[in-house]
Each structure stands twice: as structure tokens, then as C-alpha cells.
Amino acid sequence: MSNDLVQRLAEHRMLGRAPRQELAWLVAHGSLRQLNTGDILTPKGDPVTGMFVVLSGRIAIFLDRGTGLHKALEWRAGDVTGLLPYSRLTTPPSDTIAQEPTEIIAIDREWLRDLVLECPEVTTILVHAMLDRSRAFTSSDLHDEKMLSLGKLSAGLAHELNNPVAAIERSASLLEDRLDEAQLASRELGAARLTDAQLAAVDALRHACLATGVQGVRSPLEQAAHEERIADWLADRGVDEAIADALSETGVTIEALDALAASISGPALETVMRWAGAGCSVHRLAGEIQEAAMRISGLVTAIKGFTHMDQAPAAEAVDLLQGLSNTVAVLQSKARHKAAAIAVHAQPGLPRVFGFSGELNQIWANLIDNALDALEEGGRIEVTASREGPKVAVRIIDNGPGIPDQVRDRIFDPFFTTKPMGQGTGLGLDIVRRLVLHNDGDITVASQPGRTEFRVVLPAANAESGVSS
């Protein structure tokens, strides 16, 4: 039996090139295990018991990225998985499950130290495999985290765009009717044959209607009361009260209406009020369309700046304040949903930092998004940027409940999360740490109830050359 296993190892895609005596050592210190479809080789959270040489079949690991389980990695005949020499793996991030009838040789972890001494060729092969596995996990993690970030970004952008788009549709549909009303009212005004003094009073009302210097923003109760006062004024003079709706949205005051009534009365007054109401409505709807279009343009600019989709992925001198502002703009929808406030403060004269723009924005997005998740309703996030010698420090501070002491040292570990199942992958802060290191930076965290601060320090760019100083 052992000779058969040695022969099967000699035909193994990964280990077959090792000396036969080393393969025999593996067989002597391992055990043949057979798994049925659906059997769990190593459950999530349990210690990995050893190294597993796959002889036939296939096993896979499934991860929950927040949208259900999906296959992250798979090992087939000719692969080796589990604990490898010099690996820091302790527990798997999820269940490792047989996808079909599978045979493996399991070598208990207690023999791995001896394996390094007795099987140098096998050890070399396995170390290379471990490096490949690390790169595969890193690539998979980064891709999945970017897809999750893209999903959040798309959802937030769709929500943000929905409001101005709906406003444009609503205002445009009303504008056609209001234009017809304004055209009819203009004809009636021309037929009223007003004097020069009366036309001057009409112009004064028009200027009041179009005035933008309204003091503050009325509350719903204040707005209702203002509209009711105008409606009462119109009713007292025998004018259609429906005109009050359009006039109440403008800067028209009761005093301005009284000044008009001093010059015009009777049927002519109602004609003027209809003309003013229709004109006010047209200008208000046109203004709403313009404001909504500008909001869409601003969102597109923010998204373009956030993703840097028109720039090559190269290190450069990056405007931190612009990146932070774009990131906050992208996350506004989620902040409003939690009634949370986000403030951004940058030290005057803040230098640019040297790094990868898209990666830095992903750092800010992940940290601010995590802070929003931690906040209670009505919480607050402070984002500050200041110079510290040849470095620039960005602090993201929230007033949430804080990170428990017992888990603070693990928050940057891959797959570790304190969020409920399906709401967190445990990859966000691991990705942040990797991206910070890739940009020659450093990240630390300090937390207590009511204050959690993530501090990211990055190299300042040289003003003349653009490289880090």
C-alpha cells in the first residue's frame, strides 16, 4: 500500500519532482483519507490540523462577501493545501469542503518541523506554493473588496442621482403647463391697458418675485403659514387663492403685494396676479431643473475624481483635500441615511502627498464607510489632514461606541470582522493596511467609547519634483 502511495506521489503534479526517499517520508508520516461530496475537511474557526496532499477529486473554500457564499479558491488532484512549512495559517477563513469524492494524504502539523529537516526538496516546492497561494489570496481579496466597494459606490450613486433626476422629470412635466398659463396671462395683461405707473408697480412685483435674497430657509410650518397669509390677502381682494402656491415659493412679501394693490385693483389686479403667479412658477421650475442638473454634474465630477478613471495608475503628487472631499461626496447618501455628519478639515497650505490616487481614495472610502457603520443615528465623523514634518497625517475620527480592547489587535487581520454575518467580509481593513503600505505609509488606531481614531501617515511630495520628500 505504501509503495502504491509513493508511486502516486511520484506522479503528483506538484510533488512528483521531489526525490523518491522524500516522497516515502511523506507517506510514512501521513495517512490516507477519503472524503465524500460535501464533507468538510477543516471547519471555519477550527485549527488547521496539518498539510493535505490532494491525490484525486477536488476541495474548495467558500467565503461570504456580503452577497452570499461564493467559491474563493479550489484545489484539485496535484495540489497541496492546508498548513505548509513556515506558514502563519492557524484557522481557515471559511469551511473547506469536498466538491466530489476526494482522496488526500494528511500529514499532521506536528511533523512539519521534521519535514523541513528531512525533505529539503519538498520544503522548497511547498514554500514556493505557499507564496503562490498568498498571491492568489491577495489578488482574490483585492478584487472582491474592489467589487464590494464598486457595489456600494454604485448603490450610493444611484440613490444620489435618483433625487435630481426625479426633480428634473417632475419640473419638466409641470413646466409645459406653466408656460401655457404664462402665455395666456401675458395676453390678458397686455389687454388690460395699464398705465405707466401701474406697469412700474407690476415690475416691482416681478422683481420681488424673482428675488433670491430670501433670509434663510423656511421650515414646513413657516412655509405653510406664509402661503396662508398670501391666500388670505388674495381672498380679501377677490383674487383666486390658488395663485398663493406659486407666490409663496418666492421672495414676494405682503408689503410688496400691498404696494401693488395701491396702484391696481379690481379685475386688473387679478390679471396681474395670474401673470405674476405663472411667471413665478416658470422661473421656479427652470431654477429647479438647473439646480438638479448642476447636482448631477457635481456628482459626476466627484465620481470621476474619486475613481481617477481618466488617469494612468502611476504614483504622483496627490491633492489630499480633493480626494477626501470626493470620497465624502460619494458617501453622502449613506451618511444622510444615518443622519450622520461628516466634516473635513485640512491645514492651510497642506502639501500634496506622493502615492496612487485611486488607492488612496479607496483607503478613505473604506475607513469612512467603516466609521459610518459604527455610528449610531445622528453620529459624527471628523476627517482632518495636517503636516507632520516630512509626512502628512490624515485622521478619521468617529464618536461611535469604540473598538473593544479584546479585538483591537486583530482588526487588520484578514477575514476578521465584528459585523453580523453577511454584513462584513473582514477584508476592508486588511485591504486598507496593504494599500497604505503600498503607498509607503503607516496606519494606527486608537479607540475608546465615544472616540475611535484611525491615523494614516503618508510621505509628502516634493514640491519641485513631485516625488516623496
Image (spheres, rainbow, N blue to C red):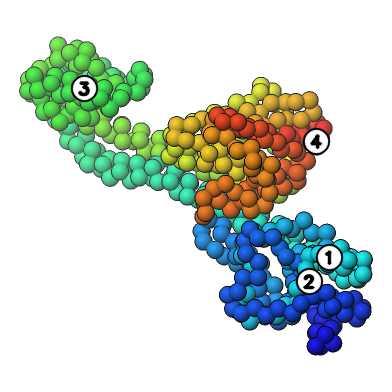
For mark 2, what is the residue? 107
Question: In this rendering, is residue 45 above or below 168?
Answer: below
Q: Is residue 67 above or below residue 228?
A: below
Query: Which image quarter is the N terminus in?
Result: bottom right
* Mark 4 neighbour class, 10 Å CA radius: few under 14, some 14 to 19, many 20 or more: many
Image coordinates of residue 373 in percent, x first then y, are: 52, 41
| Amino acid type at mark 2 | Ile
- In the rendered image, residue 376, in percent from the top left (x then y), is placed at 47, 35
> Which residue is at 59% across, 61% downward?
63
Give the alpha-carbon distance from disc 1 to disc 2, as whole Å: 8 Å
Badge number at residue 225: 3
Work out whether 177 lies above or below 155. Answer: above
- Give the percent coordinates (x, y) of residue 434: 72, 47
Of residues 399 and 86, the one nearer the viewer is: 86
**Separation of disc 1 and disc 4 at Cα?**
44 Å
Q: Secondary structure at mark 4?
A: loop
Name the side, left or right, on which 261 lies relative to 402. left
Please count the marks in the image: 4
Disc 4 target residue: 468
Mark with earlier residue (3, 1): 1
Q: Local crowd at mark 1 within 10 Å, few (<14), some, or many (≥20)? A: many
Identify the residue position indicated by label 1 in the image.
112
Query: Could you say whether the residue bearing mark 1 is in a helix, strand or loop?
Result: helix
Q: Residue 201 is drawn in which quadrant?
A: top left
Q: Nearer the viewer, residue 332 or 101?
A: 101
Instruction: Determine the CA span between mark 4 and mark 3.
Output: 60 Å
The amino acid beneath tag 1 is Leu
